[in-house]
Image (tube, rainbow, N blue to C red):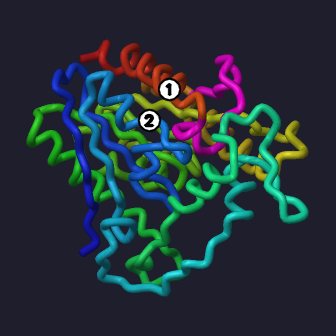
Amino acid sequence: MDHANVLYQIPAEETGLPMVFLHGYGQSRMGWMTTPDGREGWSDMFLKMGHSVFLIDQPRRGEAGQTSVAGTINTEPSDQTWYTQFRIGTYLNDEFTYNEGSQFPAGEEALDQFFRQMTPDTGMDNAGGDQNIDNTVVAQAVAATIDEVYARTGKDSILVTHSQGGMPGWETARYTDHIAAIVAIEPGMAPQVDSDDYKALLEKKIPVTFYYGDYIGEEFTDVPAAAMWGFMASTADTFTTSYTAAGGISTVVHLPDEGITGNDHFMFQDMNNDVIAEHIENWIQANVMSAE
């Protein structure tokens, strides 16, 4: 019970470090494997780049649903809320409208498949509170996965997190010495400076990069949640300023600044997900592999 479930693939010619993927809220590893319109997902893309890939369903989610702390499972969909929260577009008068220039797969069928990827948690936090995710349980399961990868391969892993997965992702650094780098895709928050997570990352000299898509900031007055995500991104800036001053490696990538526009919270499922995967691979080569 309270374990992670891991699906993995090993390339015929492994030239890069292993990559461990942790999904976000309401998601499972399926989001890394494919897209709502059936295109290739990041797991296959990075596999072709020479990385072994390890795709986690976190404890109490997806195929890791056995839990020691049962909770009430809410299966009621909140499609309209997530559509706006994830910056895919707006919902008004019973109609979904994509943001201008959106890279999200077009069409009702793709949107339907996207919502069908969502899956509920099966348990509560270990304190018996009203939180449906226990970050420490998840972090320790991710650390155990990374340690197992090291035991089998002798290699440290690049941890890729998304959204809610960012929080236990930071904490994972406290429980394993085998993280080569962390790639955080629009994490909920960056670690607070001088927190236990921050100190563990810095002590172990783990390179970090943050990736943020489009439609973020107060200037996008017609995009719901744009200001909220602007605040989230500002925590990455604060972290990076302190982390680099202390000798660590941290970068914050705003895709529009790189000439890559139209991306929402699920950039790894957007129409240009291959372009972003290549951008991340270039960061890995420059900041992780060069130090090997």
Q: For marks 2 and 1, give the one nearer the viewer.
A: 2
- Residue shown at the point (53%, 26%) measured from the top left: 276
Dot 2: what SS?
loop
- Comparing 251 with 223, the one in front is 223
- Comparing 171 with 209, the one in front is 209
In the image, residue 266 lies in the stretch drawn in magenta: yes
Q: Residues within 10 Å of mark 2 (few under 14, many from 20)?
A: some
Note whether 17 is above or below 127 in the view shown: above
Note whether 167 is above or below 199 in the view shown: below
Amino acid at dot 2: Glu
Residue located beneath label 2 in the image: 40
Residue 224 percent location from the top left of the image? 81, 52
Residue 51 percent location from the top left of the image? 27, 28
- Residue shown at the point (32%, 48%) measured from the top left: 55
Which quadrant of the figure contains the C terminus?
A: top left
- Dot 2 and dot 1 residues touching (CB under 8 Å): yes
- Please tell me in which quadrant of the rendered image residue 34 appears: top left
Instruction: Give, as a single range, the part of the protein colored magenta.
Output: 252-270
Q: Is residue 274 left or right of residue 286?
A: right
Q: Is residue 65 left or right of residue 125?
A: left
- Comparing 94 with 54, the one in front is 94
